[in-house]
Image: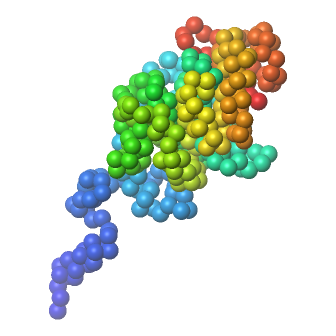
Amino acid sequence: MTSSIEKAAQRLEQLRKAGAVLPGDKVASTGVAASEAPVLSRGTPAPHAGVDSHTALAEHGRSKSVQLDLTALTANGFVTPNAPRSATTDQYRVIKRPLLDNATGKGASLVANGNLIMVTSALPGEGKSFTAINLAMSLAMELDHTVMLVDADVTRPTVMTKLGLPQAAGLLDVLRGDKTELADVLLRTNIDKLTLLPAGLAHERATELLASDAMTSLLQEMSKRYSDRIIIFDSPPLLLTTEARVLASHMGQVVIVVQAGQTLQSDVEHALSTIESCPIKLMVLNQVRSHGLGGYGYGYGYGYGYGHERNAGERGAASAMA
């Protein structure tokens, strides 16, 4: 008669042959012990219908974790989950709502790739990175969505620096085709629903990589992989390079940041003309003074503006959507 110990040993061997991970086993693809292998929890994105749970676990397990200093970010004017209610947090609640509606099919019409949202500007220095980060932070507070923030301004990446993190492997490393996969470079944060994708290590052909077929394929994969994920791209300015225009052609939505009182109307009009094919274009007017939009002479009729301009660079963003 087979002993209980022998039966247990046979059962363990059957489980291993079936691909199960048992305590003490090593996971070949990740190099972590099974006791360290992640499990799906409330903070883990539910996989898209086309992605099985093993794939979801692999991505979650291979990505690294980073800690954001939320207190320092709040002090620097960023929206964070633990920050008290302020004019800025309220403004980004207003800004994100139409973007969410378009991404989830609740808008006036169904938007292809509506969950791919590019944040850009006509020229540098208008606050696009500040806006992209705040928008991602605000979206990460939603109950039903996860957010990926991508630093796609590959020639002048600033997202990681603004978040107080070192530059790391990321988007460019995936596009170079050196067997680096997306899951290898994603950074999970201590904000439950926020994941980061850095620009990646410097490359002499960074701008060409951003406009390559590999980028097109990656965007298609990112758009379809998880149905609940909103992806925010901090892109290069529209009037400096052609890469931002190529990137915009794959987006469902484009947010253009305009610095109040500084950006010329002609520059805004020129920037808009470069992305005419984009289905949805929205505008955020940054650093609006408390007396509203009328004093700036743009004459666009974007509805409303509010907030207070502060002295510290990009801080004190105010909004106007169209």
Along the horizontal axis of the image, is 307 left or right of 209? right
Please indicate, yes or no, whether residue 112 appears anywhere in the rendered image: yes
Residue shown at 72% from the left, 29% from the top: 273
The foreground one among 211 and 232 is 211
Residue 210 in the image: above or below residue 127? below
The colour scheme of the drawn protein is: rainbow
Q: Residue at x 17, y 81 (%)?
A: 6
Nearer-the-camera pick, 3 or 203 = 203
**Quarter of the view holding residue 311:** top right
Where residue 13 sits in the image (x, y, percent)?
Answer: 23, 76
> Which corner quadrant of the image does residue 276 belong to?
top right
Residue 196, given in percent of the width and then of the height, sits at 46, 38
Numbered circles on residues, count: 0
Q: Is residue 252 left or right of residue 178?
A: right
Residue 310 locus on image (x, y percent): 60, 10
- Quadrant assignment for the C terminus: top right
Q: Residue at x 35, y 42 (%)?
A: 64
- Location of residue 54 with respect to 195 vertically, above or below: below
Instruction: Say which residue appears at 52% left-offset and 39% top-offset.
Output: 211
Report x, y in % for residue 258. Answer: 67, 20
